[in-house]
Image: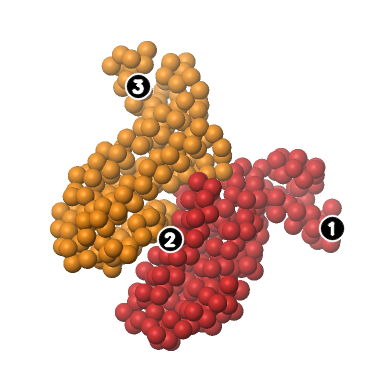
Chain colours: A red, B orange
Amino acid sequence: VSGKTPQGLQTRRAILEAAARIGSVDGLEGVTLGRLASELELSKSGLFAHFRSKEELQLATVEYARRIYAERVVIPGQSSPRGIATLYALLHHYVALMEQRIFPGGCFFASAMAEYDTRPGAVRDRVAEVQRQWLDALERSARDGIERGELREATAAAQLAFELEAAVLSANWYYHLFDDATFFARARRAVRSSLEATATGKGRRQLDAVIAACG
Amino acid sequence: VSGKTPQGLQTRRAILEAAARIGSVDGLEGVTLGRLASELELSKSGLFAHFRSKEELQLATVEYARRIYAERVVIPGQSSPRGIATLYALLHHYVALMEQRIFPGGCFFASAMAEYDTRPGAVRDRVAEVQRQWLDALERSARDGIERGELREATAAAQLAFELEAAVLSANWYYHLFDDATFFARARRAVRSSLEATATGKGRRQLDAVIAACG
């Protein structure tokens, strides 16, 4: 089956879905062509028609996961008004994605970061790039919020983005380690109280509106 | 070599030191008796005199790492006055340990948590227990701080402990992913500003004193 026919694209998608799922639980290094072939009941040569090497498969899996975050976190988050509303909505949709357990092992990029932070190569570079874009998106929203008079002028945008992201990232780890959803509530509370403490009067009104819209 | 002679204890310590080092970089599952034997130039049967199974070795490695955190983080942290000073000092010494790169792959327990959060068994249970004790120690200091009138009465101790820990835990991940020590500075700033915002007048004086003492 060539990778370009409709059936080929469907197979490719099924491979990447399985690889992302396995990757979030056992790590991307655990995603071997042999394991995928047996899980998907495909021949190894059938798999090789789609991915010629383990690294090519791993990079394609990272792109597949990145698209899920784009569709479910970044695009809906950025459809809110720029500034504090987008900042809140990005973090809200990230936590919601974790709560929905789309990736059974938790945040795909948190797992990939843990696995590749000390393992040089193309996969690590791409994971770092995606994670950097995520931190940058948060920081940019914070800057927008300052410019629009929603966050106090003295706010350090990069610092605020780091602190908010730290709360949602750690909730992902502790939720899985302790099997305790309280940590998502803690992350939401941290995000909300930190933004309330940093917001101007105008910013608080925007924040209340986006919280009501996100539900 | 028996495990009980001085030479045996020295060998055991060398094995655990290597296992903790490898574990922080490649994960505890990557610590095989074969790999240790070749790194330490020991026979496999020599290793088996100390640890009869991979799991026994992994559990002993967790205890070895726990003792390093006890000696370098918990004991010096708790030698500060109870309350806000201990809370600050625990987090300060944790960040200092990461900065010193005692574990080349970063925080041993962050790596172990990432590796075992979805892998049931004795190692996961022990890692969760140690991590729980750490969160509890932070929460207890926060409670002490409230009781002693150093933190505002309305402070939610568990929430504060979670937020502070999230900052130092995430700094560990981002420092290694981006090879950028700025993240440690961000974590320190987050801890300090969060404690300042929560402290009473008495608490601020205690905080200034412990910051001066920690350097």
Q: Position of residue B2 (x, y in %)?
A: 37, 12
- Which of the 4 image quadrants contains residue A103? bottom right
Q: Is residue A201 above or below residue B133?
A: below
Q: Residue at x 56, y 43 (%)?
A: B118
Q: Is residue B206 above or below residue A22?
A: below
Tell me how far mark 2 sits from mark 1, CA to CA.
41 Å
Asked if disc 2 and disc 1 are in contact, CB closer than 8 Å, the reply is no
- Which of the 4 image quadrants contains residue A61? bottom right
- Which of the 4 image quadrants contains residue A122? bottom right
Residue density around tag 2, few if under 14, some if 14–19, many if 20 or more, within 10 Å? many
Q: Residue at x 64, y 65 (%)?
A: A67
Mark identifier at residue B149: none
Q: Position of residue A66 (x, y in %)?
A: 61, 62
Mark 1: amino acid: Gln
Q: Could one spot residue B143 in this view of the protein?
A: yes
Mark 2: amino acid: Ala
Residue density around tag 3, few if under 14, some if 14–19, many if 20 or more, within 10 Å? many
**Residue wearing tag 3:** B11
Q: Is residue B56 above or below residue B181?
A: above
**Residue wearing tag 2:** A166
